Image: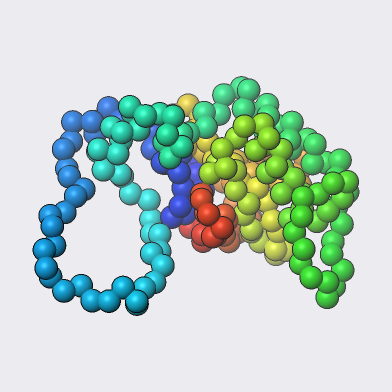
Amino acid sequence: MAYLMNGSVTFGARFRAAALGLLATLSLSACATDQGTAHVGSASSSAAMRDGGIVMPPAGWLNFCGQHADDPSCKVVQLDQTRWKELQAVQASLRSIQRVSEKKGQADLWQVADRQGDCEDIALLARARLLAAGWPLSSVRLATAWTENGDYHTILTVDAVKNGTPVTYVLDNRFAVVLSYQKLADIGYRFHMRQAARGPNWVAVRS
């Protein structure tokens, strides 16, 4: 099963638990020595740090997560039968929402769907229901994609680990069942961007 890649995924969804044992003995330090009095310029000129690709974290961080599994940054959703049934139940509930489109020229207003809504509203509803069921915020993220018909569309991606392997599933109001992101890519979806794991920013999706 494939995993939706970007530069802001959570630790737990990136690496298998086996990596903890494999790298536990490594002692590479991630700390530099004191810079002393070297001139580093003014702090007035700044820019946002941009995320790149996924890399293996320092061994010390893996050890930390092995000892502090309750730390929010180390948590991972194990896709067991209970979690899978939760996904299926939320997906099934979306089918009762009447799909309506905003009128041409109308402001693009996103809000959690009640009895009706467009794709963004329905994706927000799916997100709200999974969060209410205890899913961590970092695993439940809105995303946009072009469908196989070329329409721009909003969906909900869900990151988890299944049998030790990172996976991404999608809740999409166009379908009756939960699908993997790879399945949607196979039928012609082109994923564009999705929410960062934390904060208000979004990140580009790499295929």
Query: Within the image, what quadrant is residue 195 found in?
Result: bottom right
Q: Nearer the viewer, residue 152 or 10?
A: 10
Q: How is the image coloured?
A: rainbow
Relative to 58, is 112 on the left or the right? right
Residue 178 lies, in percent from the top left, at: 68, 38
Query: Within the image, what quadrant is residue 83 found in?
Result: top right
Q: Would residue 124 be seen by someone viewing this image from the given angle? A: yes
User: Number of numbered discs present?
Assistant: 0
Residue 185 lies, in percent from the top left, at: 59, 51
Q: Nearer the viewer, residue 69 or 88?
A: 69
> What residue do we see at 63% from left, 28% from top?
84
Q: Nearer the viewer, residue 175 or 199?
A: 199
> What residue do we see at 35% from left, 33% from top?
65
Q: Would residue 184 be seen by someone viewing this image from the given angle? A: no
Q: Up-down: is 144 above or below 71?
A: below
> What residue do we see at 81% from left, 49% from top?
113
Q: Residue furthest top?
A: 81
Residue 62 lies, in percent from the top left, at: 30, 35
Relative to 108, is 137 on the left or the right? left
> What residue do we see at 31% from left, 73% from top?
43
Q: Up-down: is 148 above or below 16?
A: below
Relative to 38, is 24 on the left or the right? right
